[in-house]
Amino acid sequence: MNNKWFQQIAIGLTVLLIAAGLYYYYRIPPSISISKLALKTLDGKPFPNSILRNKVVIVDFYQTWCGPCMAELPELAKTAELYPDDMGVVCLSDEDSTKLIALARKYADSKIIFLQTVNPLKGLGVHTYPTNYIFNRQGKKVLEKTGTVDWQSSEMMMFYKNQVGGN
């Protein structure tokens, strides 16, 4: 009787540990610094991170096969228009550049900056798509979230205004 009870507790703890590990692996955004990301343009040239200096920067890690990622792009395009001189919206992927170029052409009239990461996203610790960050003008991470964001919500609008205004 005691042995069976012990086995059930051991199985329960094992399942709990596996679930916690999977949650951490897929739902907790990795610690990322925008200044340390190695980025390149879709034609393979190095992207100078200095272009984003002194701007509020939204970074969206995505994949073209990810439905929620693609659904979020129209809102990100609208968001990029809000403060074009003070805020940048950067969409990052490690996929083949031909797929990314086709997507970038679709949003050519937007202010979104489509780039590739030099290192695979999984190597950066990004395992869930989309994974989003906002960095303030000083490059400090002020928001991180896995999954979709309602970029046009009143809460986010106030957040942008506070970040761009320097509050």
Image (tube, helix red, strand yellow):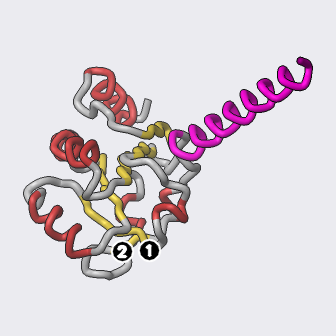
Looking at the image, which is closer to me, 57 or 94? 94
Look at 35% across and 60% down and name the residue there: 92
Q: Mark 1 points at which residue?
A: 118
Magenta residues? 1-27
The amino acid type, in three-letter code, at marker 1 is: Val
Residue 8 image point, x, y percent: 77, 25
Q: Name the residue under label 2.
A: 40
Q: Are marks 1 and 2 in contact (CB under 8 Å)?
A: yes
Is 3 included in the stretch rendered in magenta? yes
Residue 26 image point, x, y percent: 52, 44
- Position above or below: 7 against 41: above
Judged from the image, the secondary structure of the residue bearing numbered disc 1 is loop
- Position above or below: 48 against 7: below
Look at 13% across and 53% down and name the residue there: 110
Looking at the image, which is closer to me, 43 or 51? 43
Quarter of the picture holding the N terminus: top right
Residue 24 image point, x, y percent: 60, 41
The amino acid type, in three-letter code, at marker 2 is: Lys
Is 111 included in the stretch rendered in magenta? no
- Position above or below: 161 against 96: above
Q: In this view, does 31 lie to the left or right of 164?
A: right
Q: In this view, does 165 lie to the left or right of 20?
A: left
Crowd tier of the residue under label 1, counting other residues whose Cα lies within 10 Å: few below 14, some 14–19, many 20 or above:
some
Look at 35% across and 50% down and name the residue there: 60
Q: Distance between the residues labelled 1 and 2?
A: 7 Å
Q: Is residue 21 left or right of residue 8?
A: left
